[in-house]
Amino acid sequence: MELVLNNISKHFGQRHVLKNINYTFIGPGLYVLFGHSGCGKTTLLNILANLEKPSSGQLIIKNKNRFSKAGIIFQHHYLLGELTAYENVVLPLQINNCEINKEEVNNFFAKLGVENLKHKRIKYCSGGECQRINIIRTLLSKPAFLLADEPTGSIDETNAHFIKETLLDLAKHLLVIIVSHDRTLFANLSATYLKLEKGSLLEYGVED
Amino acid sequence: MGWKTKLIITNLKSSKLSNLINVIALSFAVIIGALFGAFYFSQQDMIKNQSKLFPEYLTSNIEKSEEIEHESSFLKLKQVSRPSINEVNSLLAFNIDAEVRLNYTNLFLQDQLRAYEQKLMPVLPIFLYDFTFDETQKKMLDTRQTAEDTTNSVYVNQAFIDELKNYINFVDYSEVKLKYTLSVMLDNETYEFLFEFNIRGVFFELEYLSTPKLFLSQVAFDTYFQSTYLSDDISIYDYILALPPTDVLSSYSYRLYFSRLDDVHKALEVVDSLKDEKSYLNIVSEHLSRIQSLKDILNFTNIVLLISIVLIVISLLFINVTITHLEIKKANAKIALLYYFGAKTSEIIDIYLGQNLLIVSLSMFTLLIVPKIAQFINLFLYDFLGIRAQIEVPLLLFLDVPFLFPFLIFTVIYGGASVISIINILIKRQKSLIKRLAHND
């Protein structure tokens, strides 16, 4: 699939956050979008997720094979503390009256290494565990592509490493775009690195 | 269990303290609202019942008021006089069942009562038609023996007995000998009439502003005055009947003995509707004045209560508004997430309405203690004002509709709380809210 940013600009009043951005994300693949705070990363992410409209330009999604909806992994997991991990991950499916494939859910729990937490309430889980459960919830909604906004921002190193590995693994068959303020957090990954500077997007190189 | 129900339960669990404060605030709103409602709707019955708590509830005086303009003054004088029989009959022609009799009250106001030659307190002589009492009167009567319709028998009220104890010592009121001497000046001659009484019974009437009363038989005194002749062979009865309407011994009025309470109300209504500016009939009596004063107090109490209750309920709803607002604000991310997952506004509103439903339903249980509180208020009113109040909380039947009263209370409280939730959710409905999920650059 392809995610095409066609001359995208965004301004808030007099402040121009994004200026004529032209870029095509090709999936499956991993992209790491970095830049210092306030450079417009989250604005771009919101535009990619269709949560925000650009001031000018177009976002085109080509060859979508699932749904056109983006799956977003936020820095904070936004899981509901009083519900169990299982109840949290199936909630979007229940809201949309989708059938719950228990085997698929169990596989995701196993894959993310949180099988034992299925019936544990979120308020008793650690930050890293919550982020893994958050990824399961996002993946169960079968997104067309994945956007991760500082996905390792508030978790320990072991969990951060696991999340990175997981995203890398997912990128083998899905377009995954990671947004981070620090490139070094996601260094040495087989990914395309993009830097957002003064409202423009620069390709910084590809690492294997 | 559906996802909405699950979220309602998790919402309740996650904000226990806020929900508890909410339940307490709404419980108070339920209690205060229910009590005020009960008090307001009980008033008419209460006044009606109070008016039956006087032995003379079917009697009153009828007088004529005239405004007299003075030529050299801007002041208007009001003259009260005894109306003519024709004027009284014209009132009774409005299908009002009542007997008209002479009013002897002023004869008895000229002297004081004595017991064992000791001068006693002033009393209010009240004439009853006779000593045949109806069921209403019997309910408030404590009597040792049946009294004959004679001028030697009287009934008194509890205030009389209480006051009498300040003057003389006695164990049994039926053994107290009372004496009343009437010294009446008629045509420059003084006539003395001596009446010796025995107390035949005590009426436990409404204690509110109660004064010592002496209940006398109209029939007995009519007979007595008709058979007692003055020096020029005219009976006292005929003498009083022939007095000019403004003579003090005419008592400025006739006495009316109604058949039913409905006749009293009807007469009051007719008199009220026939009032013109200069001359009008008045139905007056001590017990009607007390009922009127009770009505005035209740009207005043209503205003004070209404203001207090509005302030209290506003305060309680303010607590509810604040807590609901804070709860929904706290749940901003949750609401945004639900929108992001594809939930509709109506589904999110359902969750918060469901939550409110449980909170309001819980607070509705306090309705069960409201009748007990009303009972306590009734006791308080009886102990301190002597008003046998009848504040009844119509939990089961109101306006002939089962459970209407609790339903109305529930609707007002739940409606108020729900409107607040809906407004809060609608304000937060905007899509830009979803952006709050992501942290800003």
Image (cartoon, coloured by chain):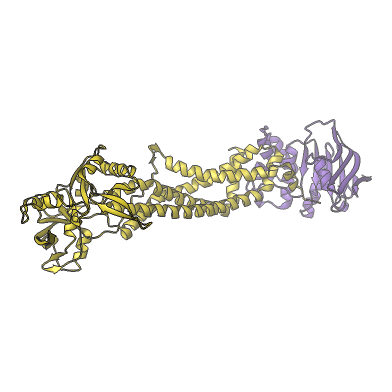
Query: Would you say residue B402 is visible in this rendering?
Result: yes
Chain corresponding to purple in the figure? A
In x, y percent, where is residue A127?
Answer: 72, 52
Q: Nearer the viewer, residue B206 or A186?
A: B206
Q: Nearer the viewer, residue B30 or B52?
A: B52
In x, y percent, where is residue A22?
Answer: 91, 39
Total marks drawn?
0
Q: Is residue A36 above or below residue B401?
A: below
Please indicate whether residue A18 sits to the left or right of residue B82 in the image: right
Residue at the outermost front position? B72
Q: What's the residue at 60%, 50% (across, down)?
A: B14
Please indicate whether residue B149 sits to the left or right of residue B427 in the image: left
In x, y percent, where is residue B175?
Answer: 10, 62
Query: Would you say residue B19 is visible in this rendering?
Result: no
**Residue B158: which quarter of the image?**
bottom left
In x, y percent, where is residue A181?
Answer: 85, 52
Q: Nearer the viewer, residue A112 or B398?
A: B398
Q: Is residue B100 above or below residue B28?
A: above
Quadrant location of the N terminus of chain B? Answer: top right
**Residue B430: which quarter of the image?**
top right
Chain corresponding to yellow in the figure? B
